[in-house]
Image (spheres, helix red, strand yellow):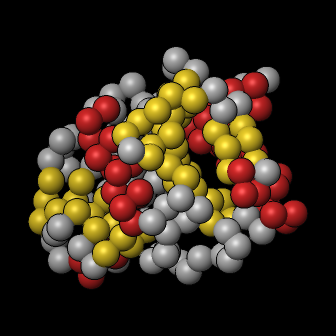
Amino acid sequence: MRYAFPMGTATAIPVDEYLHTSFPDLDREYRDGELVERALPDYLHGKTQALLCAFFLALSKRLSLYPCSGTRMKLNPNRYLIPDVAVFHPDEPESVPVNPPLIAIEILSSDDRLGEVREKLEEYRKWGVRHVWLVDPRSRRFYTCDAGLAETATLAVPELGIEIGFDHLFS
Protein backbone atom coordinates (compact mmCIF):
# COMPACT_ATOMS: atom_id res chain seq x y z
CA MET A 1 0.00 0.00 0.00
CA ARG A 2 1.26 3.50 -0.81
CA TYR A 3 0.37 6.77 0.88
CA ALA A 4 0.83 10.38 -0.12
CA PHE A 5 0.44 13.02 2.57
CA PRO A 6 0.78 16.78 2.61
CA MET A 7 3.86 17.89 4.59
CA GLY A 8 3.27 18.10 8.32
CA THR A 9 0.32 15.73 8.53
CA ALA A 10 -0.04 12.68 10.75
CA THR A 11 -2.31 9.79 9.88
CA ALA A 12 -3.47 7.01 12.22
CA ILE A 13 -3.04 3.41 11.01
CA PRO A 14 -2.50 0.02 12.70
CA VAL A 15 1.14 -1.04 13.21
CA ASP A 16 0.78 -4.10 10.92
CA GLU A 17 -0.33 -1.84 8.10
CA TYR A 18 2.62 0.49 8.74
CA LEU A 19 5.09 -2.39 8.56
CA HIS A 20 3.72 -3.39 5.14
CA THR A 21 3.52 0.10 3.68
CA SER A 22 5.91 1.82 1.30
CA PHE A 23 5.85 5.54 0.77
CA PRO A 24 6.36 7.48 -2.47
CA ASP A 25 9.18 9.60 -1.04
CA LEU A 26 10.78 9.34 2.42
CA ASP A 27 9.85 6.57 4.87
CA ARG A 28 7.70 7.62 7.82
CA GLU A 29 8.18 6.93 11.51
CA TYR A 30 5.42 5.31 13.55
CA ARG A 31 4.56 6.88 16.89
CA ASP A 32 1.67 5.56 18.93
CA GLY A 33 -0.53 4.76 15.94
CA GLU A 34 0.38 7.77 13.82
CA LEU A 35 2.59 8.07 10.77
CA VAL A 36 5.03 10.92 11.27
CA GLU A 37 6.93 12.54 8.40
CA ARG A 38 10.65 13.11 8.67
CA ALA A 39 12.44 16.19 7.38
CA LEU A 40 13.49 15.86 3.77
CA PRO A 41 17.26 15.60 3.53
CA ASP A 42 19.22 17.93 1.29
CA TYR A 43 22.56 17.26 -0.42
CA LEU A 44 24.73 18.17 2.59
CA HIS A 45 22.64 15.90 4.83
CA GLY A 46 22.91 13.02 2.36
CA LYS A 47 26.63 13.53 1.87
CA THR A 48 27.23 13.54 5.63
CA GLN A 49 25.12 10.40 6.02
CA ALA A 50 27.08 8.63 3.27
CA LEU A 51 30.43 9.68 4.75
CA LEU A 52 29.49 8.44 8.21
CA CYS A 53 28.36 5.09 6.81
CA ALA A 54 31.59 4.80 4.80
CA PHE A 55 33.65 5.59 7.91
CA PHE A 56 32.00 2.79 9.88
CA LEU A 57 32.03 0.38 6.94
CA ALA A 58 35.81 0.82 6.71
CA LEU A 59 36.05 -0.37 10.33
CA SER A 60 33.34 -3.02 10.09
CA LYS A 61 35.38 -6.20 9.62
CA ARG A 62 38.06 -5.34 12.17
CA LEU A 63 35.58 -4.26 14.87
CA SER A 64 32.44 -6.30 14.05
CA LEU A 65 30.43 -3.18 13.20
CA TYR A 66 27.18 -3.26 11.23
CA PRO A 67 26.30 0.26 10.04
CA CYS A 68 23.01 1.08 8.32
CA SER A 69 21.13 4.19 7.27
CA GLY A 70 17.43 5.01 7.25
CA THR A 71 16.42 1.70 8.89
CA ARG A 72 13.17 1.29 10.82
CA MET A 73 13.82 0.27 14.43
CA LYS A 74 11.25 -1.04 16.88
CA LEU A 75 11.66 0.72 20.21
CA ASN A 76 8.42 -0.77 21.53
CA PRO A 77 5.21 -2.18 19.96
CA ASN A 78 3.87 1.32 19.23
CA ARG A 79 7.08 3.15 18.36
CA TYR A 80 9.26 2.75 15.26
CA LEU A 81 11.94 5.37 14.71
CA ILE A 82 14.38 5.77 11.83
CA PRO A 83 17.82 7.13 12.72
CA ASP A 84 19.85 8.68 9.91
CA VAL A 85 22.73 6.31 10.76
CA ALA A 86 22.90 3.42 13.22
CA VAL A 87 25.82 1.17 14.04
CA PHE A 88 25.34 -2.25 15.60
CA HIS A 89 28.02 -4.19 17.47
CA PRO A 90 29.02 -7.00 17.84
CA ASP A 91 26.17 -8.81 16.04
CA GLU A 92 24.24 -8.02 12.88
CA PRO A 93 20.63 -7.09 13.71
CA GLU A 94 17.44 -8.60 12.34
CA SER A 95 15.53 -6.98 9.47
CA VAL A 96 13.67 -4.60 11.78
CA PRO A 97 15.96 -4.24 14.80
CA VAL A 98 14.34 -4.64 18.21
CA ASN A 99 17.58 -4.26 20.20
CA PRO A 100 19.32 -0.88 20.39
CA PRO A 101 22.36 -0.20 18.24
CA LEU A 102 25.66 0.82 19.78
CA ILE A 103 25.42 4.21 18.02
CA ALA A 104 22.44 6.23 16.75
CA ILE A 105 23.17 9.38 14.74
CA GLU A 106 20.84 12.13 13.63
CA ILE A 107 22.00 14.66 11.05
CA LEU A 108 20.39 18.09 11.07
CA SER A 109 18.63 19.19 7.91
CA SER A 110 17.78 22.80 7.21
CA ASP A 111 14.08 22.21 7.97
CA ASP A 112 14.54 20.15 11.17
CA ARG A 113 13.05 21.47 14.38
CA LEU A 114 15.68 21.20 17.13
CA GLY A 115 13.10 20.45 19.84
CA GLU A 116 11.75 17.45 17.92
CA VAL A 117 15.27 16.20 17.18
CA ARG A 118 16.22 16.47 20.86
CA GLU A 119 13.13 14.44 21.85
CA LYS A 120 14.10 11.75 19.36
CA LEU A 121 17.67 11.65 20.69
CA GLU A 122 16.32 11.22 24.22
CA GLU A 123 14.14 8.33 23.04
CA TYR A 124 17.25 6.57 21.73
CA ARG A 125 18.96 7.06 25.12
CA LYS A 126 15.96 5.70 27.01
CA TRP A 127 15.86 2.70 24.64
CA GLY A 128 19.44 1.86 25.64
CA VAL A 129 21.60 3.27 22.84
CA ARG A 130 25.02 3.91 24.45
CA HIS A 131 26.23 6.55 21.98
CA VAL A 132 23.64 9.04 20.72
CA TRP A 133 25.04 11.72 18.45
CA LEU A 134 23.80 14.77 16.59
CA VAL A 135 25.76 16.10 13.61
CA ASP A 136 25.18 19.59 12.22
CA PRO A 137 26.94 19.65 8.84
CA ARG A 138 26.19 23.34 8.21
CA SER A 139 27.90 24.61 11.33
CA ARG A 140 30.38 21.70 11.35
CA ARG A 141 29.49 20.81 14.93
CA PHE A 142 29.09 17.54 16.81
CA TYR A 143 26.91 16.92 19.84
CA THR A 144 26.53 13.99 22.20
CA CYS A 145 23.31 13.27 24.02
CA ASP A 146 23.73 12.08 27.59
CA ALA A 147 21.92 14.28 30.08
CA GLY A 148 21.00 16.78 27.37
CA LEU A 149 23.06 17.89 24.39
CA ALA A 150 26.74 18.70 24.79
CA GLU A 151 28.91 20.06 21.98
CA THR A 152 32.11 18.11 21.42
CA ALA A 153 35.11 18.42 19.08
CA THR A 154 35.04 14.72 18.20
CA LEU A 155 32.65 11.81 18.47
CA ALA A 156 34.12 8.81 20.24
CA VAL A 157 33.42 5.21 21.13
CA PRO A 158 36.23 4.73 23.67
CA GLU A 159 35.52 1.03 24.24
CA LEU A 160 36.35 0.37 20.57
CA GLY A 161 39.03 3.01 20.09
CA ILE A 162 36.92 4.97 17.59
CA GLU A 163 37.18 8.73 17.27
CA ILE A 164 35.81 10.82 14.46
CA GLY A 165 36.23 14.53 13.75
CA PHE A 166 34.99 16.76 11.00
CA ASP A 167 38.42 16.35 9.36
CA HIS A 168 37.58 12.64 8.89
CA LEU A 169 34.28 13.47 7.23
CA PHE A 170 35.15 16.52 5.17
CA SER A 171 38.86 16.24 4.39
Task: Judge left or right: residue 45 versus residue 156.
Answer: left
Q: Residue furthest right?
A: 62
Q: Residue furthest top?
A: 139
Task: Name the residue: 15% across, 47% down.
Answer: 9
The image shows residue 86 at horizontal and vertical percentages of 56, 57
User: What quarter of the picture does the N terminus occupy?
Assistant: bottom left
In this view, 97 is above or below 147: below
The image shows residue 107 at horizontal and vertical percentages of 49, 38
Q: Quadrant of residue 156?
A: top right
Task: Judge left or right: residue 7 versus residue 134.
Answer: left
Relative depth, front residue between 125 and 58: 125
User: What quarter of the picture does the C terminus occupy?
Assistant: top right
Residue 1 visible somewhere in the drawing: no
Task: Name the residue: 78% across, 68% down.
Answer: 64
In this view, 9 is above or below 87: above
Q: How many marks?
A: 0
Task: Judge left or right: residue 131 versus residue 55.
Answer: left
The image shows residue 6 at horizontal and vertical percentages of 18, 43
Task: Name the residue: 28% across, 79% down.
Answer: 77
Task: Name the residue: 49% across, 61% down.
Answer: 129
Residue 114 visible somewhere in the drawing: yes
The image shows residue 26 at horizontal and vertical percentages of 39, 50
